[in-house]
Amino acid sequence: EALETLQGMARVVEALLEARRTSKQNLQLAFDRQDALEEIARTQKVLQHAERMARIGSWRLDLETGLVRWSDQTYAIHGLEPGAEEHLANAMLFYPPDDRAKLEAALTRCTQDGTAWDLELNFTDAQGTSRRVRTLGEVDLRDGKPVALIGVIQDITDRYHFERRLLAVARTDELTGIASRRAFNEEMEQL
C-alpha cells in the first residue's frame, strides 16, 4: 500500500512537472508571438513612411462585396481623410470617363483571366485638383479562385509634368518658339 501511495505521488509529481514544462513552453510561445507582433508593427510603420515618401498607396478590392480597402496614403492621394471603406463605384468617380473605361477594362480582364495591369491615368482628387496617377493591380487567388484584386496607386503628377515640359522643349525651337526641325520631321514622317 505504501508503494502504491509512492507511485501515485510520483505520477502526481510527473504530471506537475509536465504541466510546468507545458506552461513554460506556452509562456515562451506567448513571448515569441508578442515579439513577432511588435516586429510586424515596426515593419508596418516603416512601410507607411515609405508609402508617404514615395507617394504610393496600396488598395484591395473584395470581389464579393465590391468594397475597397485603402491604405492611408491612398486616401491622401485621393484627397480624403482615412476612414471607412470606399465602394468601387465611388473610387472610379475620381477618373475622367475615358480613363475610367481603361481602368474598368483592366479590372475586368484581371478578374476574368488574371491579367495584371500597369496604367498611367488622369485623375481628379476630392478637392478638384487634376493629377496623374500610376496604378498597378493583380488578382488575389484563394484555392485557385479570384477573391480580390490588390494593387498600388502612385501620384506621378510632378514627374508627368516634368516629362511633358521636356518633350515640349525638345519639340520647340528655343529662339523662335515654333516647332523644331525634329518635330517637323516627325510630322512629315507621320503624314
Image: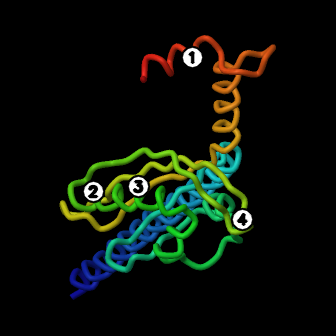
Q: Position of residue 142 (x, y in %)?
A: 25, 63
Query: Gap between marks 3 and 1, in whole Å?
Result: 31 Å
Residue at (21%, 88%) from the top-left corner?
A: 1
Q: Residue furthest left?
A: 144
Q: Which mark is residue 51?
A: none
| Near-viewer residue (16 or 45) | 45
Query: Gap between marks 4 and 1, in whole Å?
Result: 36 Å
Q: Which mark is residue 109?
A: 2
Q: Position of residue 81 (x, y in %)?
A: 71, 71
Q: Report helix, strand or loop for mark 4.
A: loop
**What crowding class fits label 4: few (fewer than 14 Cα within 10 Å), some (14-19), or many (20 or more)?**
few
Residue type of the residue flagged with mark 2: Arg
Answer yes or no: do the residues labelled 4 and 1 have beta carbons within 8 Å?
Answer: no
Q: Give the mark, 4 or 1, whose residue is nearer the N terminus.
A: 4
Query: Gap between marks 4 and 2, in whole Å?
Result: 29 Å
Residue identified by numbered label 1: 184
Answer yes or no: do the residues labelled 4 and 2 have beta carbons within 8 Å?
Answer: no
Q: Which mark is residue 102?
A: 3
Residue at (58%, 13%) from the top-left corner?
A: 182
Q: Give the mark, 4 or 2, whose residue is nearer the N terminus.
A: 2
Query: Gap between marks 4 and 3, in whole Å?
Result: 21 Å
Nearest-to-viewer mark from 2 and 1: 1
Q: Report helix, strand or loop for mark 3.
A: helix
Q: Give the mark, 4 or 3, whose residue is nearer the N terminus.
A: 3
Residue type of the residue flagged with mark 4: Gly
Nearest-to-viewer mark from 4 and 1: 1
Residue identified by numbered label 4: 128
